[in-house]
Image (spheres, rainbow, N blue to C red):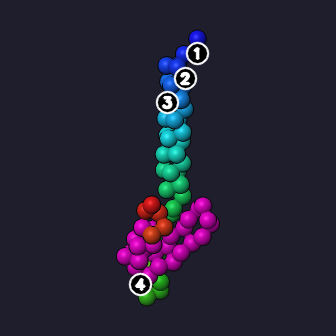
């Protein structure tokens, strides 16, 4: 039987499913970011950020710069 109550429940469930799909996609996209540190021959640290979604690597000279880059690109 297709009552207004049943239609409301189905719409609510569809809305919840879409919301959770967005949450899952957001969390999955966050895992596509890889950060690592390396050192040059003089021992100076260099930070690298790889974004798997864009297939782009950014190289930065400090941890502070790396954090700012991540905040600017992923803290939305």
Kind of element beneath mark 4? loop
The 10 Å Cα crowd at callout 3, few under 14, some 14 to 19, many 20 or more, is few
Single out the mark in the foreground, 1 or 3. 1
What residue appears at the point 60 percent right and 61 percent down from the top-left corner?
53
The 10 Å Cα crowd at callout 4, few under 14, some 14 to 19, many 20 or more, is few
The 10 Å Cα crowd at callout 2, few under 14, some 14 to 19, many 20 or more, is few
Kind of element beneath mark 3? helix
Kind of element beneath mark 1? loop
Q: Position of residue 68 (x, y in %)?
A: 41, 73
What residue appears at the point 54 percent right and 32 percent down from the top-left corner?
14
The furthest residue to the top: 1
Kind of element beneath mark 2? helix
Quarter placement of the C terminus: bottom left
- Callout 3 touching callout 2 (CB < 8 Å): no
Q: Earlier in the sequence, mark 3 or mark 2?
A: 2
Q: Which residue is mark 4?
A: 44
* Res 2 label: 1
Single out the mark in the foreground, 3 or 2. 2
In this rendering, the answer to whether 21 lies above or below 36 is above
The span shown in magenta is 47-71
CA gap, disc 2 to disc 4? 63 Å
């Amino acid at each position: 039987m297709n009552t207004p109550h049943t239609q409301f429940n189905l719409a609510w469930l569809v809305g919840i499913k879409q919301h959770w799909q967005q949450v899952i996609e957001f969390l999955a996209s966050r895992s596509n970011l890889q950060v690592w540190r390396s050192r040059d021959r003089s021992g100076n640290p260099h930070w690298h950020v790889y974004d798997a979604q864009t297939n782009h690597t950014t190289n930065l000279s400090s941890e502070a710069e790396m954090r700012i880059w991540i905040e600017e690109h992923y803290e939305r």
